[in-house]
């Protein structure tokens, strides 16, 4: 029923539309006899609308033609689609393109430079630190600055150590480093480089060994050499019992041996691994007990062989675990302190060059590094800036296009 | 109404730049002059359906043909029909016109409620149409899409197929909207009569 009605509607609609098509084309239209009243009325409306079509006045027709002809006579610039067709606007002239490009490059450069300077401040420090390995003067100068500035900031870093357990305050700061806590199952290590006055070496080495002993430890390794200039230097590793804050107290004494050129301490929390090892050990031991019990009950040779082979696997695992645990016990039971003693000619062990090193060479090196960084950063920034610039350029073109169209209208 | 040919105005309008090897397609769009002669009246009538008053209609029509002239070199009869091309320009010009109207409220007649019209489509009063007042008012009650199609159908007198291409809707859709618009007009007129 509904379908029929809709069908009928569609047919009527199509008929009416056909009639209208003929009507507007100026063909004679005869209203269908007995057509629906509604349709008739709509057709009447359509004819009324078609008849209402206004015509341009002769004056307008003529003046517009003259306008167009004069534009043609002026030989206006090669006609360019400015309307619907041809999206590339004719006003995209070279100067504008150049201006936009220049602006983009400037933005690019400034962004790059700023980025490099920001990064430079951060990375430059790291670069100086890492490059200082074999260059004592650089380290010392770096250190002096740090010792002066690292106070409270260093404290904050160190305070975080007990939580993370993996404390690595490798800033190389001196006496102001906070003491690391004596947490169970933490591998504590410290690295020192101490400058001595000539002739002090033997005495200081003896003191170092005494410190190790005093804090329940020992000298793990010692290696000393005398240079061609008669100055002695050597590397020592001592261990102190990791109890009663011995680690920190020993360090406090080592600080007094000479001029601390660099100092680094770290703690590695192995509690988790240790607990894991212990539980694995317990597990393996339980298995071992089970296997032994099974062995008692074993009837055939095959069974015995099988059980024994498994048993030996378990026992070897137990040995490994025990070894690892014992190693960890040692490493955590003793804190390791590596000390490099170095006699320096004259003075209190301070490298003399530092007194006259005004950082000029460093500045030049840093400037070079900054330059390279700037280039690197610009390259990286391109990845961001190019898409952004494309979008911005598109928006700019669109906006200018719209404005221009509007302005053109006003002028017209 | 005298045609251009009758008035004997010389045909100085340029020939369209010939494209290599392209045969003169679709005779009417062969050069700009014939385009002008063929489409001035439809464009003007169409514009009258969309704007307010003869002066504005003439203004906008002039803009449309100037724009068409400037863009004529880009027009490729193999790619689109002249009517589609020209009426696309016309619609763009009308959009621009509405925008500029919206941006210059001072120019808009004062009896219109300030700021009431949608910014892109200030209500044209259709004064250029030779219509009785009721029908004109009824036309203003159609929505933008319906009025556009009525304008294209009865003003521009182009086929439903051309309208469908221009508006990028299906031909059936054009018919349906046209039909709906007419029915709305009829209902509105009948209602108006009852009110009288």
Image: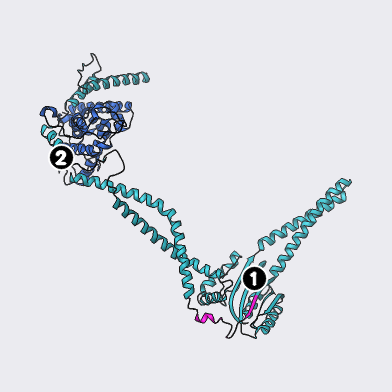
Chain colours: A cyan, B blue
* Residue B111 position by quadrant: top left
Question: Residue at point 46% right, 71% down?
Answer: A364
From the top left corner, tell me how far across and down residue B34 is, in percent.
Answer: 20, 30
Q: Which residue is mark 1?
A: A189
Return the residue nearer the eye: B143 or A195: A195
| Residue B179 against residue B124 in the figure, above or below | above
Q: Give the residue at x 47% y 69%.
A: A366
What residue is disc 2 on? A70
* Quadrant in the picture for the C terminus of chain A: top left
Residue B139 placement (x, y as % from top left): 21, 31
Left or right, A245 with respect to A363, comes to right
Tags 2 and 1 touching, CB below 8 Å: no
Q: Within the magenta stretch, is there residue B79? A: no
If you read the primary sequence from the N terminus, does the residue marked by circle 2 or circle 1 appear first?
2
The answer to which quarter of the image holds residue A55 is top left
Q: Chain of mark 1?
A: A
Hey, which quadrant is residue B177 in on the image? top left
Q: Give the label on residue B177, or none.
A: none
- Of residue A21 and residue A158, the one placed in the foreground of this image is A21
Is residue A117 in sight in this rendering?
yes
Gap in angstroms between the C-alphas marked 2 and 1: 93 Å
Magenta residues span A339-359
Q: Judge whether residue A345 is colored magenta.
A: yes
| Element class at badge 2 | helix
As helix, strand or loop, the secondary structure at mark 1 comes to: strand
């Amino acid at each position: 029923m509904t379908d029929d009605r809709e069908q009928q509607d569609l047919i009527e609609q199509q008929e009416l539309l056909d009639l209208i098509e003929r009507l507007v084309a100026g063909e004679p239209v005869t209203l269908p006899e007995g057509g629906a009243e509604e349709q008739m009325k709509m057709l009447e409306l359509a004819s009324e609308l078609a008849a209402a079509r206004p015509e341009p006045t002769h004056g307008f027709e003529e003046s517009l033609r003259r306008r167009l002809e004069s534009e043609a006579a002026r030989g206006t610039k090669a006609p360019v689609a400015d309307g619907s067709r041809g999206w590339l606007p004719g006003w995209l002239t070279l100067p504008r393109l150049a201006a936009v490009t220049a602006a983009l490059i400037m933005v690019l450069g400034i962004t790059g430079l700023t980025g490099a300077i920001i990064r430079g401040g951060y990375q430059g420090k790291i670069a100086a630190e890492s490059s200082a390995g074999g260059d004592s003067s650089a380290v010392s100068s770096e250190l002096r600055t740090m010792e002066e500035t690292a106070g409270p900031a260093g404290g904050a870093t160190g305070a975080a150590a007990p939580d993370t357990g993996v404390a690595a305050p490798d800033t190389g700061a001196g006496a102001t480093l906070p003491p690391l806590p004596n947490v169970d199952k933490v591998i504590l290590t410290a690295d020192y480089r101490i400058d001595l006055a000539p002739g002090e070496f033997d005495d200081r080495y003896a003191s170092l060994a005494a410190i190790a002993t005093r804090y329940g430890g020992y000298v793990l390794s010692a290696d000393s050499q005398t240079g061609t200039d008669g100055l002695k230097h050597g590397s020592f590793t001592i261990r102190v019992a990791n109890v009663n804050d011995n680690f920190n107290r020993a360090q406090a004494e080592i600080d007094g041996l000479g001029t601390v050129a660099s100092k680094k301490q770290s703690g590695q929390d192995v509690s988790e691994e240790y607990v894991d090892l212990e539980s694995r050990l317990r597990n393996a031991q339980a298995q071992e007990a089970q296997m032994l019990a099974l062995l008692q009950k074993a009837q055939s040779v095959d069974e015995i062989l099988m059980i024994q082979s498994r048993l030996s696997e378990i026992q070897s695992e137990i040995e490994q675990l025990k070894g690892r645990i014992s190693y960890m016990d040692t490493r955590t039971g003793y804190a390791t302190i590596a000390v490099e003693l170095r006699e320096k000619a004259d003075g209190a062990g301070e490298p003399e060059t530092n007194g006259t090193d005004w950082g000029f060479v460093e500045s030049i090196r840093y400037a070079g590094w900054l330059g390279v960084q700037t280039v690197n950063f610009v390259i990286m920034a391109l990845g961001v800036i190019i898409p952004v610039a494309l979008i911005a350029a598109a928006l700019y073109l669109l906006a200018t296009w719209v404005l221009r169209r509007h302005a053109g209208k006003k002028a017209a | 109404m005298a045609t251009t040919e009758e008035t004997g105005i010389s045909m100085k309008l340029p020939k369209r730049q010939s494209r290599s090897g392209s045969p003169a397609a679709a005779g009417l769009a062969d050069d700009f002059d014939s385009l002008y002669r063929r489409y001035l009246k439809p464009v003007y009538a169409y514009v009258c359906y969309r704007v307010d008053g003869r002066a504005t209609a003439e203004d906008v029509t002039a803009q449309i043909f100037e724009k068409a002239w400037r863009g004529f070199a880009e027009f490729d009869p193999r790619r689109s029909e002249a009517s589609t091309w020209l009426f696309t320009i016309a619609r763009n010009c009308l959009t621009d016109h509405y925008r500029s109207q919206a941006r210059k409220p001072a120019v808009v007649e004062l009896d219109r409620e300030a700021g009431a019209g949608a910014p892109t489509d200030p209500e044209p009063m259709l004064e250029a149409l030779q219509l009785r007042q009721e029908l004109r008012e009824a036309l203003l009650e159609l929505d933008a899409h319906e009025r556009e199609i009525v304008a294209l159908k009865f003003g521009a007198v182009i086929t439903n197929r051309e309208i469908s291409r221009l508006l990028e809707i299906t031909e059936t859709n054009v018919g349906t909207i046209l039909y709906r618009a007419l029915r709305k007009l009829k209902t509105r007129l009948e209602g108006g009569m009852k009110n009288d």
